Amino acid sequence: MVGLVRGVASIGVALAVTSFTMSARAAPARVRVDWPSVPGCPDAKSVAARVEREMARAAAVDPVVARAEIEPPSAPGDPWRVWIRTWTSRGAGERTLEADTCAELARASALLVALAAIRTTAPARSDELAELVPSPAWTPEPGEDTSSAPIGLPPRPQPSGPSEEPSARFIVSAGTWTAAGLLPSLAWGPTVAGSYELGPWSARLSLRAAVPRQELLGSLGATFDALGGGADLCRAFPPGRSETFTSRVCAGIDLDAIRARGEGGTTTDAVRAEAVPFFGLGAAWWPAHPIQLGFDVRGGPSLLQPSFVVLSAAEGLRGLHRPSAMRVEGVLACGFVF
């Protein structure tokens, strides 16, 4: 009796093994993915397994072969890229994909391969994986179709040039300025300005005031100050230009009203005008949006050069000040972009 039980058990095990083997042979592999081994990327097995999971959701699929070439980022911030080609009984296709990480690239590639395998029409023939594409060691004969031969990744697209429609913005700024050649001693004071930028060009209007400075000549003297405005046109130029830093060249004109106030038996005021066409260089830096820091250095000849003299019974006619023939000034400002 024991021998009979053992015999039946042996026959059952044999039948189970035979059934499993026949099932395995009856279900040939549906996916082959030639996925290169690249540091930081999933391996080929995990990509093929993901393809299988995606294909399991479809009602009918064809065997599919995929071959991929991966290009890691060439610089920080660049994306991962993959060129992937697929073959099924219905034909071949290819696509280039980009992603921030290779893991995302692998997920997108697996989905692409699975989509290629989904059967939309009845197959014209039933192909095994080996029949879909030659092996990697295959070399085409002269005159044969080489459409299945792997090719390199398409060239990385170059950054697009400046937009045909330049961006416009308005900047209101305030700061300080200093000038040599306007008052008897170095002039300095507050300044405010408004700028309109359109692409590389900018136009600016400014107002400024000079802190009073005293000038003494023996027993004679006067207090000088100034109030003025200016207009200039600037253009950004390539050296030192980036997304957060811009250098520029500027040209314009300054108009100033210089006031001299003398004190004695009576208080007298004298106001004279001065004009200076100038040429200068500047730079702008954006430490954070919408803040802009700007610095300009400019210079030009004095066109009017008014004279300030005082008449004294004791000392006669004495000159107190006359602006120099050339003026040089610098402006440091902080602005807000609108």
Image (cartoon, rainbow, N blue to C red):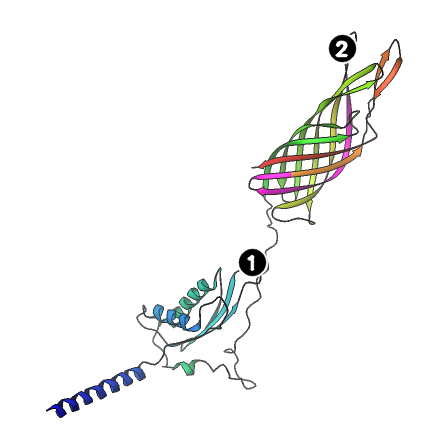
For the point 71% across and 23% down, which residue is it?
211
Relative to 240, is 67 above or below? below
The three-letter amino acid code for the residue at tag 2 is: Thr
Residue at the (61%, 39%) spot, across then down: 292
The kind of secondary structure the magenta stretch mainly shows is strand
| Secondary structure of the residue carrying numbered label 1 | loop
Q: Is residue 290 magenta?
A: yes
- Res 336 quadrant in image: top right
Q: Where is residue 42 in the image (x, y as percent from the top left)?
A: 44, 68
Report whether 73 appears left or right of 224: left
Between 308 and 125, the one lying in front of the other is: 308
Q: What kind of element bears circle 2?
A: loop
Q: How far apart are marks 1 and 2 (CA)?
A: 69 Å
Task: Report if residue 98 lies within the magenta region.
Answer: no
- The earlier-in-sequence mark between 1 and 2 is 1
Residue, disc 2: 267
Image spot of residue 93 (x, y percent): 46, 72
Determine which residue is flagged by label 1. Answer: 76
**Residue 106 in picture, x, y percent from top left:** 44, 66
Against 248, residue 156 (above or below) is: below
Seen at 76% across and 10% down, the residue is: 267
Stretch in magenta: 267-293
The quadrant of the image that shows the C terminus is: top right
| Of the pair 108 and 233, the residue shown nearer to us | 108
Q: Which residue is drawn at 86% across and 11% down?
A: 312
